[in-house]
């Protein structure tokens, strides 16, 4: 029993839940991050998406079991290796989805609708879109965008268009980096790219380099525009008190720009990991294991809180 629970836990991949932190984006930049009502509602949305992701991973592993058995790493997954019975996996996925959608419905009709679109698109991606060049990358970026929108909808807050473009650019950057690493990893194996993931054959090394450069630049540039234009409202706290002493021109804008160098460093570090260490196949593992990259994320978060909320 304990072994089955362990295999089930591996299948739902808790590490991947980090991606669902995107639901907090609108709340963070709205100025309401520390208001309990808003924060707890966003947290419920985060948990709903974690449940959705878990069900999707189970379904994906069932559908891709035969293909995963040919992959050097994925063949060790519980379902592909036969350690987790498929009937049990199906039962858990169905119960998970039932609970998640009841929860989502109670939060908001429109939030529930986004969740439905999210899982439907995931199922279409698993069966068809992941085999179509370019559309596979765009679909991955759409998943991140839907998370951000879901987080904004559940707390009924506006999402800045430049931050949304940043999310899209960053998602495409991560997706291309993943393809870069997968191509390098699988090209030397028996059967080549077509024997493991045929869609990779459509991406030459040169084309992936161009995509990587394009979306890496777009990520930091759209974020810089967002940071420059983001309005900071004067409120209580040490930093807003400081704002009261300086010209209004400096109060309303520009202070979030101090986080831009950190974002640029993060992009450059991730590029280094992709090209020098071939570590882009699993973005969440990279973020958790690479201390310079993790440190840049933590510094960015602290600086953002300091500027927006006067904490520090």
Image (cartoon, grey):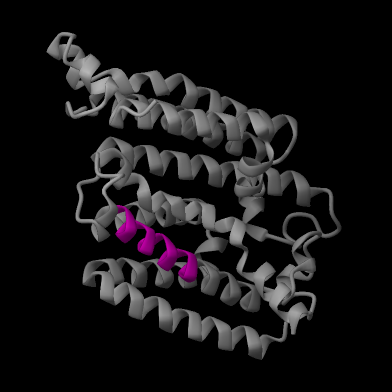
Report whether residue 160 is seen: no
Residue sticking out furthest to the right: 190
Residue 204 as seen in the image, left or right of residue 195: left
- Name the quadrant containing residue 113: bottom left
Look at 69% across and 41% down and name the residue there: 289
Q: Quadrant of the C terminus?
A: top left
Q: Position of residue 38 (x, y in %)?
A: 26, 54
Q: Quadrant of the N terminus?
A: bottom right
Report whether residue 262 is seen: yes
Residue 310 as seen in the image, left or right of residue 137: left
Residue 277 as seen in the image, left or right of residue 206: right
- Magenta stretch, main secondary structure, is helix
Over which residues does the magenta segment extend? Answer: 39-52
- Name the quadrant containing residue 253: top left
Q: Nearer the viewer, residue 46 or 36?
A: 36
Residue 159 as seen in the image, left or right of residue 214: left
Does 48 appear in magenta?
yes
Q: Position of residue 161 (x, y in %)?
A: 25, 40
Does 276 appear in magenta?
no
Q: Position of residue 52 (x, y in %)?
A: 46, 70
- Name the quadrant containing residue 149: bottom left
Look at 43% across and 57% down and name the residue there: 143
Look at 48% across and 70% down and name the residue there: 51
Q: Is the residue 149 above or below the residue 256 in the image?
A: below
Q: Position of residue 99 (x, y in %)?
A: 42, 81
Q: Is the residue 152 above or below the residue 66 in the image?
A: above
Q: Is the residue 205 above or below the residue 200 in the image?
A: above
């Amino acid at each position: 029993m304990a072994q089955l629970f362990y295999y089930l836990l591996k299948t739902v991949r808790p590490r991947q839940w980090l991606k669902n932190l995107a639901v907090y984006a609108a709340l963070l930049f709205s100025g309401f991050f520390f208001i309990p009502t808003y924060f707890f509602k966003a947290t419920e949305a985060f948990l709903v998406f974690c449940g959705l992701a878990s069900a999707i991973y189970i379904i994906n592993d069932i559908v891709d079991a035969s293909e995963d058995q040919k992959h050097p790493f994925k063949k060790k997954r519980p379902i592909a290796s036969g350690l987790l019975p498929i009937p049990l996996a199906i039962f858990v996925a169905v119960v998970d989805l039932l609970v998640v959608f009841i929860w989502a419905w109670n939060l908001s009709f429109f939030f529930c609708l986004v969740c439905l679109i999210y899982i439907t698109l995931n199922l279409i991606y698993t069966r068809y879109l992941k085999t179509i060049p370019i559309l596979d990358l765009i679909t991955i970026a759409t998943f991140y965008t839907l998370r951000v929108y879901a987080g904004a909808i559940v707390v009924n807050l506006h999402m800045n268009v430049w931050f949304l473009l940043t999310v899209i650019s960053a998602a495409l950057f991560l997706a291309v980096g993943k393809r870069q690493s997968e191509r390098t990893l699988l090209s030397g194996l028996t059967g080549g790219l077509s024997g493991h993931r045929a869609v990779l054959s459509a991406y030459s090394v040169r084309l992936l380099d161009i995509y990587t450069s394009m979306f890496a630049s777009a990520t930091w540039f759209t974020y810089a525009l967002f940071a420059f234009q983001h309005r900071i409202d004067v409120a209580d706290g040490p930093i807003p008190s400081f704002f009261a002493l300086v010209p209004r021109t400096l109060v309303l804008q520009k202070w979030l720009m101090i986080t831009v160098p950190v974002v640029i460093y993060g992009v450059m570090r991730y590029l280094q990991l992709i090209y020098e260490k071939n570590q882009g196949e699993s973005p969440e593992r990279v973020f958790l294991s690479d201390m310079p990259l993790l440190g840049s994320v933590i510094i960015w978060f602290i600086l953002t809180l300091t500027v927006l909320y006067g904490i520090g």
